[in-house]
Image (cartoon, rainbow, N blue to C red):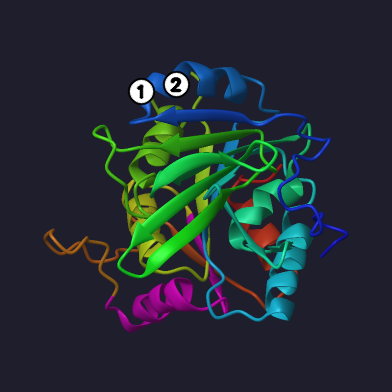
Amino acid sequence: MDTLLDATHPHRVPDTIGAVDVIVTTSSAPILPAIQARMTASPAPIALRIAGGCSGMSDDDKQDMLAWFYRNMHGFKGLLSSGGTRDIKDGRLDPMVTDVPAMLASDQVLTISTLPLVGTMQLVDDSRLRISRTDQYGTSLTHPNPGVHMLVVVQHPLGTALGWDGDVRTYFDMLNMYHHQGHRNPWQVGLVAWNGGSVTELEIKLAARYGWPVILVEGSGRAADKFITAMRDGTLDLAQSNEHSTPYNPRIHNIYVVRRDEPNSLRAQLEALNLMV
């Protein structure tokens, strides 16, 4: 993994990034000028959101995950986005899906990630940014990912701590501004889901209902495999808990399956969907 990401300096901004733009907002509207300035410089009108998590995965599995994404997405041009957090264990980077954009960031890959303000944002040590959250389970620390070009921190308008889904609507609003067909030059926008929990389930449902191509990685675990099983059983419902049923319909919803154990399956699917040029 050290050849893909610097595991020994998990708080350091890479030289290839130089500086991370950090924007704190309550919604997508106030940040659109800053986002537009960045996205205008994207080398291709393509945006991919990498969703999911790594819960239950061993250290070897996590390294294999990074290598799998690198093999499938090396040479990608456009915007990559994911959750904007980074896990750190014993002073070393503990890789997650959210490190995929940081791994691929370059002058050909613009990286804009988002995270909800789930606690109090603080500067510690040598002006290192962190988020401290205290609840019934104690105090936990969240580290913003320093390996992307821009971090969008979404906060509650009244200062209340958000849940882990607190940035989802904002990033959908942000990317849909470029995906809508009425836009002068509509972008190709898609979502790739690896593993993940309840937030990933929400992201998959929203992406499918917005008409985005959704690519589920079979064999990655949890949410991704749960949705694949439900698709094949004919029981997949894209409604949220408080909504009327929205059954999955392959003629309307663009959900695709690639296999973790097939080395180039994601690349082939991205190329077929014109999400990789």
Specify whether residue 264 is in view: no
Q: Position of residue 13 (x, y in %)?
A: 75, 39
Residue 108 falls in which quadrant of the image? top right
- In this view, the residue in front, 155 or 226, is 155
Q: Is residue 121 above or below residue 58?
A: above
* Left or right for 12, reference 234: right
Specify whether residue 102 is in view: yes
Residue 239 falls in which quadrant of the image? bottom left
* Residue 29: image tag: 1
Residue that label 2 marks: 32
* Residue 187: image tag: none
Residue with the most extreme front position: 125
Start-end of magenta stretch: 214-235
Q: Is residue 78 above or below residue 266?
A: above
Amino acid type shown at disc 2: Leu
| Quadrant assignment for the C terminus | top right
Q: Position of residue 265 (x, y in %)?
A: 68, 67
